[in-house]
Structures are given as C-alpha cells and as structure tokens.
Image: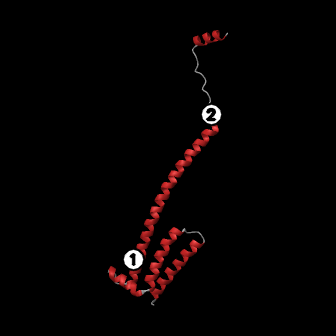
Amino acid sequence: MDRIQLIAVAVTLALFLGVFELVRRRRLMERYALLWLLSTAVLLLLAAWTGLLERVAEFAGIDVPSNALFVVGFAFVLVLLLHFSLAISRLSDETKLLAQHVARLDQELRESRRGPPALAEPPDLPEAARSSASTTNQ
C-alpha cells in the first residue's frame, strides 16, 4: 500500500467508527447513520481494494485512481445533501403545521378562560320610549 492509500483507508475507517460512536451515544439517528455507514463502507472498500478502484477510475475515464476515490466520495456527499434537504423541507412543513395548531389551541384556551360572553346591554332608548316604559312599569 502506498501512502495515499493508507491515508484514505485511515480517514474512511475513522469516519466509519465515528458514525458508530455517534449512534451509540444517541447523537445520530439510525436512519441517517445508515446513509453514512453505506457511504463510508463503499469508500473504505475502494480505498483498500486498489484493483476495484482502478477499474472504477478506468470506467469513469479518470487517469489517477485516487481522484476516482474523491469523485465517489463527492457523489455520496451530494446524495447526503439531497437527502437532508428533503428531510429539512418535510420538517419545516411539519413545524409550520404544528405552530398553526398550537396557535389555534392557544386561542381556544384564551376564549374558554374568559367565560361565556356576557349578555349585551339593551341599546339606549330614546327619551319618549323611556318615559312610556317607566309609566307601564308603575
């Protein structure tokens, strides 16, 4: 193994173990960890198995096999970014709906604390109507 291959294997192995540690500490959810583990496993396989990396580089038309490793890594990063963008969009929509629901519940709670609406006082009657109403009450 040459030095660049050793560095690539060490870095991808460290990333692989780092993802496991994050899952173990419950800092990374399993559904996201699967993507990271898959990408690091593929990169580790390509970094360790030079024959496969050379075939991938030749197939892609890349002269230097180590550059193919970086291209594959970059492709995985793009897939991860797309996945996380979709997750963020979904969570943003859910947050908006939850905020609207909480606002509606808050409004209902405030209205229920006020009690039933008070009966409105009768409108002021003109003077002639008041005098006739007072004479009929006597």
- Taking the spot 49% from the left edge, 73% from the top edge, the residue there is 36
Mark 2 Cα shell of 10 Å, populated few (<14), some (14-19), many (≥20): few
Q: Which residue is mark 2?
A: 116
Residue lying furthest bottom: 1
Left or right: where 88 falls relative to 116: left
Mark 1 Cα shell of 10 Å, populated few (<14), some (14-19), many (≥20): some
Measured from the top left, where is residue 105 in percent x and y?
57, 45
Toward the viewer: 30 or 65? Answer: 30
Measured from the top left, where is residue 62 in percent x and y?
34, 81
Image position of 99 with respect to 71: above or below: above
- Taking the spot 47% from the left edge, 65% from the top edge, the residue there is 84
Left or right: where 135 falls relative to 97: right
Q: Which residue is mark 1?
A: 71
Left or right: where 119 falls relative to 62: right
Image position of 51 with respect to 74: above or below: below
Distance between the alpha carbons at the discs numbered 2 and 1: 68 Å
Q: Secondary structure at mark 2?
A: loop
- Taking the spot 40% from the left edge, 73% from the top edge, the residue there is 75
Identified by mark 2, the residue type is Pro
Identified by mark 1, the residue type is Val
State which quarter of the image contains the N terminus: bottom left
Q: Secondary structure at mark 1?
A: helix
State which quarter of the image contains the C terminus: top right
Q: N-terminal of the two: label 2 or label 1? A: 1
Measured from the top left, where is residue 43 in percent x and y?
45, 79
Q: How is the image coloured?
A: secondary structure
Q: Quadrant of residue 83?
A: bottom left
